[in-house]
Amino acid sequence: MRFAIATSVAIALLSGLDVALATSWGFKDATISVQSKGDGVGGGSKETLTEGKVLSKRIELGTSDTLKILLTTQEGKSAKRPHQTYLSISDLSGLETSFPFSVKDSGKGKLEITQKDIPDQLLASANPLSASILVASFGDSQPFNKKAFDLNIKEDPNSPRKAPEKPLRYGKLPEIRHIFKADPKSPPKIITLFFAAVVLGALPALFGTWLLLGANVNHLSKALGSSPVSHALYFGSILAMEGVFFMYYLSWNLFQTLPVATAVAAVIFLSGSRALTEVQERRLAGLR
């Protein structure tokens, strides 16, 4: 029993020793300076930052000022480059933004920011902003994240700050009603009737020309007797094709017209080939 108690006490002491000996991240040789435009090298105010201690003096950042922080990150007492080094700026409501330091392998880090880098929501804060430094990396070392100073944003009275734009919000949008192109309209009836009369008026002239050129209608009965189906289908399919064009003009659309026109065209091709073969046979027989 006493051995078990002694063992437990030893384990507890060793655990406490491990925690006490565990290294942690931090920084040293840190300075913060604010330079206005035109101050030149070494001009402006400069303060020293101490690890784990809040700077007593409030930092003022004007519209043309540049805030510059120099520091050396360290793990325990050894200068080293961590995985993350940030300056975090937040207001009383909890709104926060972060700025990464540029850190070399030697641990020397640098950060420069102006008012243009800070979000408008933080610039509009009526209270001073809280600035914290975060240093952390992989491994067992404890990260460092503590407040370093207070930042007061000075506004230029000659150029008041513009109100920030509303952020983009994803949500339900107003209904979009599409207006499609209206269906094509037929031309006025008077124009249609005029051209129909012109076509019908040309038929007597066509038939008269055939008679003058010697068209022989006496072979009609012989042609129908030799190949009645092909001649009837050929003539009927031509009339059917004219009917398809008429329906397309009247009410059909392209998707209704194409299948029917394709079927009628196939009939015209097959029946016309047979009808022309019959005409050729009569011509070879000397019938004109």
Image (cartoon, helix red, strand yellow):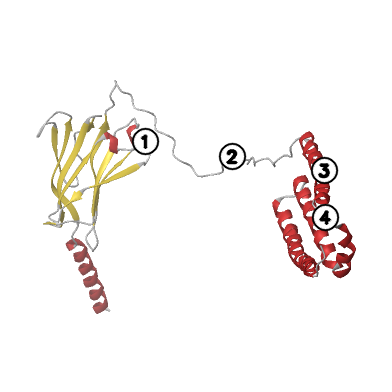
Contact (Cβ within 8 Å) of mark 1 with mark 3: no
Of mark 4 and mark 1, the one earlier in the sequence is 1
Q: Is residue 264 rendered to the left or right of residue 92? A: right
Please give the name of the residue rendered at 77% of the width and 39% of the height, measured from the top-left corner: 195
Of mark 1 and mark 3, the one earlier in the sequence is 1
Quadrant of residue 179 within the rendered picture: top right
Image mark for residue 231? none
Instruction: Give me the C-alpha separation between circle 4 and circle 2.
Output: 72 Å
- Identify the residue position indicated by label 1 in the image: 121
Instruction: Give me the C-alpha separation between circle 1 and circle 2.
Output: 28 Å
Image mark for residue 200? 3
**Which amino acid does the dot numbered 3 rest on?**
Leu
**Which amino acid does the dot numbered 2 rest on?**
Pro
Image mark for residue 215? 4
Q: Is residue 263 rendered to the left or right of residue 86? A: right
Instruction: Give me the C-alpha separation between circle 4 and circle 1.
Output: 96 Å
Q: Secondary structure at mark 1?
A: helix
Contact (Cβ within 8 Å) of mark 4 with mark 1: no
Q: Secondary structure at mark 4?
A: loop
Please give the name of the residue rendered at 80% of the width and 41% of the height, measured from the top-left corner: 196
The one of 259 and 114 positioned closer to us in this rendering: 259
58 above or below 158? below
- Identify the residue position indicated by label 2 in the image: 174
Contact (Cβ within 8 Å) of mark 1 with mark 2: no
Instruction: Give me the C-alpha separation between circle 1 and circle 3.
Output: 81 Å
Q: Secondary structure at mark 3?
A: helix
Of mark 1 and mark 2, the one earlier in the sequence is 1
